[in-house]
Image (cartoon, coloured by chain):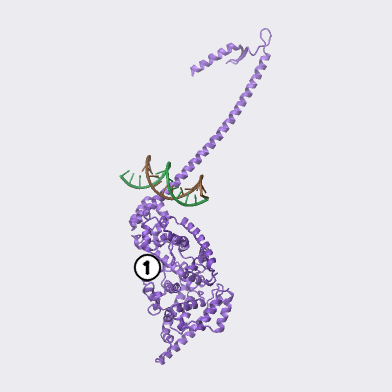
Chain colours: A purple, B brown, C green
DNA sequence: TAGAAATGTCATGGG
DNA sequence: GTCCCATGACATTTC
């Protein structure tokens, strides 16, 4: 229940912030005192505020018959606010369930609600989780019963006609409500002593506020329609109550068009259901980003409900804060929001985190090796979804937590304003691609409501399977985000690891001198650069070694081929020589067969030999004399050499 | 689960 | 003397 209230109050806060984003600022003192109390008070203020008073004070109208602790005006306005943000589909029954449960939790429901309203709401709740087809019957029931809260934005994405009808109905109801309020106010004036109900008194004060509030909402709506969502400029004066022309340099598409569900908010509030919702986060994120790039943001808004809208606004606020482009906002608000985020993160211990940092062995800051077992068990299962940055409500990786909260402990400020561009670009590149890992990954499927979730052993099996999946994802994330990258992020080092390693030494040194960096940061940066350089050098060395081995192997192959070729050539030469010898021998025998001595007898080839003279004459000489003459010629040739 | 391959890191020497 | 790079050696991770 505490979580439920937390999300509701967070939702109101973020709705207020959203209004600020589009240039409308609420006057908390006049409109939403409890919100102001939450913002300006302690982080646990939401648990101390009577829940029903939040709505009654804000709305100040007659109480809704089905949900007495919820004033009719507030309910309508709440839905109207949702509507003003794009017709988001808040389920009436879910809203009733929240409020009823909140009131019961604070002991007010027993006094203010009757059994019939509870049974009505319970019956609605029983009907709600069923298929879409029941929405039509539900609407029919609403029309028949004349339900005051007839703004049931059943989130059928293509049901535009229903939304148009709701618009008409809304305007009619608003006019009717205003008339009732005026009449009540008149009654209050005329019957001042009449013990009117609390709601009547509130309604006496509300017309002015409600009109003004409605005006603000209408301007918000117009602003949403008119402004270019991607060209929002910063606001100069944050204290101006209303500045419709104000714009913020915010990627509004990314900031608000998150297709998230009320169911997701319920899951976030219930840790036992959270893991189940994270199953399809990555796929949903991817599909969301793809669809988001090609769809009209306003159309996207129309598919988001209020509570689904808020978490992403919160994420956007985080990003915008990181980019330092929200200086135009009221800093107190964001400071308080950050404090609330800190407070919301259960179990977070900045001191412990810093100790973990200091306990690291490598340069005193290595993080991957310093995970405590208890934290690793958590981070293993959650770091993928909660991401490196530690989303709200999740106790993610140690490094991710420290990344958020060590900002004050380290430097990283810029000396010159013009460096903001470079830093901003770097943060843009980082934070534009990281939300897939860093932020809460919402379950957009609407496939399972909390009542439909399996319980007991089935759920345990489901969770174990999810845990294994998340562990795999965590390992993948570890691959993507190396230790150095995590360290750099944890220390808010304004350079990426690639930049630190890849930039030339002169640029590197000049950057170190230009930025305000602590000794720890500089040490880590140099450590990252040294090891990164050495890593690259080792890779190059191994590559060269491998190339050398491959070249040597290639040379060996070439030499072996050359050797084979030479052997083949030698064989051919030997064959040619043997053939020539054979021919010479044949010629010899042919010549000697025709030769005759002075007696007419054949010349014996074994005793005589033919000798070619230099002048072309051919002489027949005895072999002994031929051999002797041949030896002397060889000796002469050797001597000449 | 052992072992090979790949990779990271450190120490050291040379330019 | 310092810095950078290449490389051997070792440890760790991955397959």
- Residue, x 49% and y 59% (percent of image)? A471
Quadrant location of the N terminus of chain A in the rendered image: bottom left
Q: Is residue A485 left or right of residue A127?
A: left
Front residue of A173/A437: it is: A437
- Residue, x 48% and y 85% (percent of image)? A177
Q: Is residue A226 left or right of residue A594?
A: left
Q: Is residue A587 left or right of residue A212?
A: right
Location of residue A210 with respect to A431 vertically, above or below: below
**Residue B15's image quarter?**
top left
Location of residue A58 with respect to C14 vertically, above or below: below
**Residue A208's image quarter?**
bottom left
Asked if one can make out residue A372 in the rendered structure from this viewpoint, the answer is yes
Front residue of A312/A230: it is: A312
**Residue A105's image quarter?**
bottom left
Q: Is residue A187 left or right of residue A454?
A: left
- Residue, x 46% and y 45% (percent of image)? A542
Front residue of A276/A136: it is: A276
Location of residue A395 with respect to A193 vertically, above or below: above
- Residue, x 53% and y 16% (percent of image)? A634
* Residue A609 image point, x, y percent: 62, 14
* Residue A265 image point, x, y percent: 48, 71
Q: Chain of mark 1?
A: A
Return the residue at label 1. A327
Instruction: State the SS at label 1.
Output: loop
Location of residue A467 with respect to A48 vertically, above or below: above
* Residue A322 image point, x, y percent: 40, 64
* Residue A591 image point, x, y percent: 66, 16
């Amino acid at each position: 229940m505490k979580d439920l209230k937390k999300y509701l109050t967070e939702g109101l806060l973020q709705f207020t912030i959203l209004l600020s984003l589009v240039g409308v600022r609420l006057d908390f003192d006049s409109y939403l005192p409890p919100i102001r109390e939450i913002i300006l008070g302690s982080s646990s203020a939401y648990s101390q505020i009577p829940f029903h008073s939040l709505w009654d004070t804000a709305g100040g109208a007659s109480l809704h018959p089905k949900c007495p602790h919820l004033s009719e005006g507030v309910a309508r306005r709440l839905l109207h606010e949702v509507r003003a943000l794009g017709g988001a589909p808040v389920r009436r029954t879910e809203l009733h369930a929240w409020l009823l449960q909140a009131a019961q939790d604070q002991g007010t429901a027993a006094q203010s609600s009757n059994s019939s309203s509870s049974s009505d709401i319970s019956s609605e709740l029983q009907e709600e989780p069923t298929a879409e087809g029941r929405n039509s019957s539900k609407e029919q029931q609403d029309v028949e019963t004349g339900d005051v809260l007839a703004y049931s934005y059943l989130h059928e994405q293509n049901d535009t006609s229903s939304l148009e009808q709701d618009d008409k109905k809304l305007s009619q109801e608003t006019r009717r409500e205003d008339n009732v309020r005026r009449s009540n106010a008149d009654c209050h004036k005329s019957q001042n002593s009449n013990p009117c109900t609390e709601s009547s008194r509130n309604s006496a004060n509300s017309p002015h506020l409600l009109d003004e509030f409605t005006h603000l909402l209408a301007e918000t709506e117009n602003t949403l329609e008119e402004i270019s969502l991607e060209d929002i400029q910063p606001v100069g004066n944050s204290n101006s109550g209303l500045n419709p022309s104000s714009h913020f340099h915010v990627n509004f598409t990314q900031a608000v068009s998150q297709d998230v569900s009320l169911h997701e908010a319920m899951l976030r509030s219930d840790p036992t259901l959270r893991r189940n919702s994270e199953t399809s986060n990555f796929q949903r994120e991817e599909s969301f980003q793809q669809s988001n790039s090609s769809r009209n943001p306003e159309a996207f808004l129309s598919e988001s409900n209020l509570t689904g809208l808020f978490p992403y606004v919160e994420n956007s606020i985080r990003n915008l804060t990181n980019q330092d482009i929200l200086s135009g906002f009221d800093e107190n608000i964001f400071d308080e929001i950050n404090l609330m985020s800190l407070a919301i993160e259960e179990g977070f211990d900045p001191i412990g985190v810093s100790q973990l940092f200091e306990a690291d062995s490598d340069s005193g800051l290595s993080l991957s090796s310093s995970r405590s077992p208890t934290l690793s068990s958590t981070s293993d299962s959650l770091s993928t979804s909660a991401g490196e940055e530690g989303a709200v409500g999740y106790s993610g990786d140690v490094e991710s937590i420290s990344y958020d909260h060590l900002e004050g402990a380290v430097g990283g400020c810029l000396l010159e304003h013009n460096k903001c561009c470079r830093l901003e670009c770097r943060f843009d590149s980082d934070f534009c691609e990281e939300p897939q890992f860093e932020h809460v990954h919402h379950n957009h499927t609407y496939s399972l409501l909390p009542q439909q979730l399996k319980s007991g052993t089935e759920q345990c099996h489901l969770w174990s399977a999810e845990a294994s999946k998340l562990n795999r994802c965590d390992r993948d994330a570890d691959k993507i985000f190396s230790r150095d990258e995590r360290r750099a992020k944890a220390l808010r080092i304004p350079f990426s690891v690639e930049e630190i390693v890849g930039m030339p030494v002169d640029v590197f040194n000049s950057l170190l001198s230009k930025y305000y960096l602590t000794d720890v940061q500089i040490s880590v940066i140099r450590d990252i650069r040294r090891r990164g350089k050495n890593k690259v050098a080792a890779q190059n060395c191994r590559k060269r070694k491998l190339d050398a081995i491959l070249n040597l192997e290639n040379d060996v192959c070439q030499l072996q081929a050359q050797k084979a070729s030479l052997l083949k050539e030698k064989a051919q030469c030997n064959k040619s020589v043997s053939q020539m010898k054979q021919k010479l021998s044949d010629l010899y025998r042919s010549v000697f067969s025709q030769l005759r001595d002075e007696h007419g007898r054949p010349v014996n080839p074994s005793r005589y030999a033919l000798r070619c003279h230099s002048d072309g004459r051919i002489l027949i000489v005895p072999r002994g004399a031929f051999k002797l003459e041949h030896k002397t010629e060889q000796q002469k040739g050797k001597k000449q050499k």
